[in-house]
Amino acid sequence: MKNRLIQNRRRFLKNSSLATAGVLLAPLGSYSLGPRAGYSGQSALLGGSPIRTSPWPEWPVWNNATDDELVMKTLRSGVWSRAGLVNEFEATWARETGTSRCLSVVNGTNALITALLQMDIGAGDEVIVPVYTFIATVQAVLATGAMPVFVDTDLQTFQIDTSKIEAKISSRTRAIIPVHILGLPADMITINRIARKHNLLVIEDACQAHFAEINHKRVGSFGDAGCFSFQNSKNLAIGEGGAITSNNQSFMDKCYSYHNYGNPYGASVGNVSAGTAIIGNKLRWTEYQAAVGLVQLKRLEEQTARRNSNAAYLRSKIIQIPGIVPYKLYDHVTRAAFHIFAFRYQKETFKGLSRTAFIKAMQAEGIPCSEGYSTLNKMPYLANAFQSKNYRKMYSARELDINKYNERNQCPLNDRLCNEEAVWIFHSVLLAEQKDMDDISNAIEKIYQNAEDLKKLQ
Ligand SMILES: *Cc1c(COP(=O)(O)O)cnc(C)c1O
């Protein structure tokens, strides 16, 4: 009854010019009665008022007053190819990740490819990857001619299930790519222990995990190399961009050389008078990219802190709603990046309301969310790679039997996560105020209360 009154009042306010006065809306915030409020207005999909109509923070962030200057100065200088600002960004990123070297490259995908190639990974090698990741992790392995081997997902953490890694190691396994997916650190302590035991290289895919930490040490500094992305959606957004971090000097010299046509670099790759030394590519940054990166870097610390506190608050609220199981962090994680705020939705508890319908209802309440990744081990690119000229030269027909490959690479828990349970909220939502997080938990509560009626819409 009370909720009905609130609804009517909201509708009235919405339709009256007074609503724009803002102040009148403030007392309506009082329906956030603390944890487990049992909020139960009518679902927006069923004709009720949406929980939220005001916008969420935009992404990426740009402040003309503070951000234009360096970029404009760079444009007007005419020094646009790699020079001082790129060096400065790399030195800063190495320091921030706690590594001795950083190399910028055009994107995260090519950071991974470069790292794999300069570790001499290629034809005949197997590389272990989590199945719950962005497609680029796997494409990078295929770009080298190696075989990706998928490991199933730990549903609690959304990360690679370390208890299933050793069963996937063969005499051909050369490396493992742990991905700190969703910006939540993977269990690097266990992964590094397994890697040492089996003599495997470790390349961290930290493309979503800027400034995430394990035991107060930043990700990207745990493996033989770390790879980052600065694509527009990432927590440090440049539009496009990537980086490799490492403490291995000769490896980083090789990566530098590779990203610059294979020309000699540092103490390890060739000597200048002998000419081009190794197989190369061209993956360099522009100066104005570095300028945008340096500007964005200034706010990354504050944004990361805010995402962490809002995520912890929101988690503590939604964990109390039946059928909602938020991400779990490993014990040694001291900070996450929260590229995505994720939880699992268990429809049995919501009267069988499908995840698709749940997400639609959330969006109608003004809460942006999505289903996240599809099952990467079941897409056509794998069979296509195996049919390619290069793969047929590198592997025997038996090794390229896609049915056998699929059999070995089944990941049933990940199927459930992707096809039925995962719900994602994008990181920029976590940059709002703490009280805005109540809108999210209230929306879920409301859908929980309306599940029966919402199901009839299906
Ligand atoms: C974004 C991303 C990449 C690729 O980065 P790009 O800059 O888009 O090439 C690789 N791995 C993961 C986990 C990512 O999220």
Image (cartoon, rainbow, N blue to C red):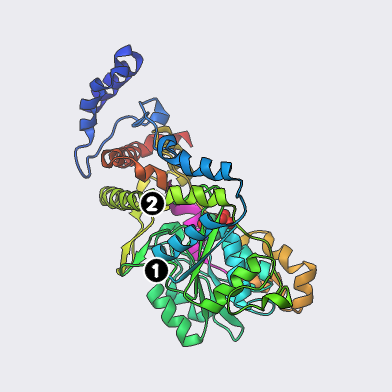
Q: Secondary structure at mark 1?
A: loop
Write down the region rendered in magenta: 410-425
Residue 354 circle label: none
**Going 24% across and 22% down the picture, which residue do you hit?**
23
- The residue beneath circle 1 is 98
Q: Position of residue 26 (x, y in %)?
A: 23, 26
Mark 1 vs 2: CB contact within 8 A = no
**Going 25% across and 51% down the picture, which residue do you hit?**
316
**Going 51% across and 60% down the picture, which residue do you hit?**
87
Q: Is residue 254 above or below residue 26?
A: below
Horizontal side of residue 397 vs 121, given as left or right: right
Q: Secondary structure at mark 2?
A: helix
Q: Is residue 54 above or below residue 371?
A: above
**Going 39% across and 29% down the picture, which residue do you hit?**
44
Q: Position of residue 139 (x, y in %)?
A: 63, 63
Q: 10 Å neighbourhood of mark 2: few (<14), some, or many (≥20)?
A: some
**Alpha carbon separation for disc pair 1 and 2:** 16 Å
Residue 408 appears anywhere in the view: no
- The residue beneath circle 2 is 300
- Give the amino acid at mark 1: Gly
Horizontal side of residue 204 vs 270, given as left or right: left
Ligand 1 found in image quarter: bottom right
- Find out if the beta carbon at label 1 lies less than 8 Å from the nearest ligand 1 atom: no
- Whether residue 423 appears in magenta in the rendering, the answer is yes
